[in-house]
Image (cartoon, helix red, strand yellow):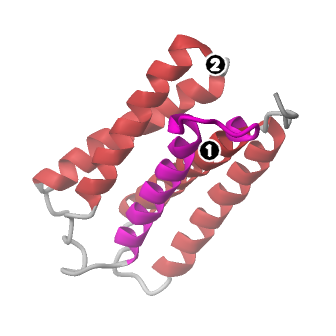
Amino acid sequence: MPSLTTPGTIHTVLAAAGIVLGMVQFLNRKRGSLHRAVGYAFVYAMLVADCAALLVFQFTGRLNILHFGALTSLACIAAGMWPVLRSSRRPDWREKHYLWISWSYVGLLAAAATELVVRTLLLRNAGHAWLVTLSVTLTVTLVGRALILRHQPAARGPV
């Protein structure tokens, strides 16, 4: 197995931190200073992890679907933070923030699960690697979708 590059190491460490920080957010009460502090730590960790991922070309030597995943993650983070950072918040800002940040976390978990399966089962060069990768990603995404819908905050009326 090749050793990690500096961007690969940064990506791996901060993505792992994102997994932990996201789980803390999932298990704790929303709102308040703890939620805000852990949330910003998650956002900063993911911004740097995703940017570092864009510098990793170790597997194909060029842009690939993994880079698309990092760009998608950056887009989810941006969309999730936009309602929070707006100077005039819309009545549905909490719901939009919840959905986009939740999907960024599900994407992170799907990527981590896929990476774990590919590396532990040594499927990178096997013919059925894409089928296993797709199955793992789809399973994590569907479970994540169910949890997002189950824990979605109730919509609020105009304030």
Q: Magenta residues: mostly which secondary structure?
A: helix
Q: Which residue is disc 2 drawn over?
A: 31
**Residue 48, can we see it?**
yes
Q: Residue flagged by tag 1: what amino acid is it?
A: Ser
State yes or no: residue 118 in magenta: no
Q: In whole angstroms, how far apart are the C-alphas of marks 2 and 1?
A: 15 Å
Q: Which residue is disc 1 drawn over?
A: 102
Say which element carries label 2.
loop
- Residue 118 lies left or right of residue 81; in this view the side is left
Give yes or no for contact between labels 2 and 1 (Cβ–Cβ under 8 Å): no
Which residue sits at x=59%, y=13%? Answer: 32
* The furthest residue to the top: 33
Please name whichever residue, 5 or 43, is drawn nearer the observer in this view of the structure: 43
State yes or no: residue 86 in magenta: yes
Q: Residue flagged by tag 2: what amino acid is it?
A: Arg
Pointer 1: residues within 10 angstroms few (<14), some, or many (20+)?
many
Point out the image quarter for the N terminus. bottom left
Q: Is residue 38 above or below residue 144?
A: above
**Residue 121, can we see it?**
no
Which residue sits at x=47%, y=50%? Answer: 78
Pointer 2: residues within 10 angstroms few (<14), some, or many (20+)?
few
Q: Which residues are the magenta region? A: 65-94
Q: Is residue 75 above or below residue 132?
A: above
